[in-house]
Amino acid sequence: MIVLLCFALIMIPWLFGRSFLLLFGRGSGEKMYRGDFILTGWIICIGLAEAAHLVAVLLGQSFSRTVNLMILMYGVLGALCVIILSVHALICRRSRGRGRMAMKPSPIGRRQMVFSLLAVGVFLSQILFLILGSCEYRQWDMTLETVQSILETDGVYQVNPLTGRPYTAGIPSRIKILCLPYFYAALCDLFGVAPQLLVCRVIPVAVLVLSYLAYYGLARFFFPEEGEKRALFLLIVGLLFWAGGFLYGVEGFGLLYAGYRGVTIRGAVLLPMVVRAGLEKRILPVILCVLAEGCIVWTLYGAGQCLLVAVGLLVCGRIGKEAGSR
């Protein structure tokens, strides 16, 4: 089942993201790449999980019932996406040969090959660390305990995961909105994966992959025609992740020790996406990232940073534009 889970974590977001960007992206989109499909699709998956989560929390429905609702939403959206991609493939087939000829890829230089191999080596070493490492820093977070309590009680935020007893004073409304424990519990329930394995192994690996995809998007923006610099950029990012593993609170530490947390996803995935979208002046990815952050990051952990970064980029862009026109 773990193989099926990993396959679903790649293909379902790709299906959702590819269809979404075909409808609402830039069409052929010179600045789009396959990683955008997976990144966008993951945000859509979080949104669907948030919808089912809110039904459970606000309407008092059981966890198992809302999981069935989430499956229905995924199924309907998946069917629509298949139709969209099928129509798009048919249109492309009919127009084949009438467009411009594809350009031959530029040859890969020796330095680019070396940087690429080193970047892949750093990435694989981090994957191996996540698979063989331990959740020794998990004591500062109750995600795993919350996931286990959801599965055991068939209810969402009904009992204190530390005591196993119902909440007496209630919990803040802002926490009730956070959907990651529900999302993880749903994955455990659907694929029969143990919560410890999913939270401490599978999700951190998935988040690390998403982070590299997000930073590769930045590399493509900064160096669109320079593969050597893109490879060097990713190598530097990977080395910074390793260096950050010794500093609590930075993205590298979060990726290597707490990749399941919302703040890690925000810092290592959403913020690079916002920076790139802001530089490219694309509003839709910014909106998606801001909404996703609202679903996964608690206010006390600085919720709203995606919006602040987007506003900062907008203000800096206008200031630079006005300065350039003088």
Image: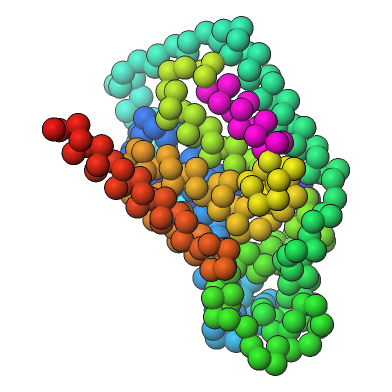
Residue 256 horizontal/vertical position (percent): 73, 45
Q: Which colour scheme is used?
A: rainbow
**Position of residue 278 in the picture relative to residue 156 (left or right):** left
**Position of residue 220 in the picture relative to residue 65 (left or right):** left
Residue at 30% across, 22% down: 99
Residue at 42% across, 30% down: 221
Q: In which quarter of the image is the C terminus?
A: top left
Residue 237 belongs to magenta span: yes
Query: Is 195 or 230 nearer to us in this picture?
Result: 230
Residue at 46% across, 28% down: 220
Residue 11 location, quadrant: top right
The answer to whether 58 is drawn above or below residue 84 in the figure is below
Residue at 64% across, 40% down: 209
Query: Is 283 or 20 nearer to us in this picture?
Result: 283
Residue 237 location, quadrant: top right
Look at the image and give the residue range highlighted in magenta.
230-243
Q: Is residue 141 visible?
A: yes
**Position of residue 168 in the picture relative to residue 164 (left or right):** left
The answer to whether 263 is drawn above or below residue 73 in the figure is above
Query: Is 239 or 128 nearer to us in this picture?
Result: 239
Query: Is 184 or 172 nearer to us in this picture?
Result: 172
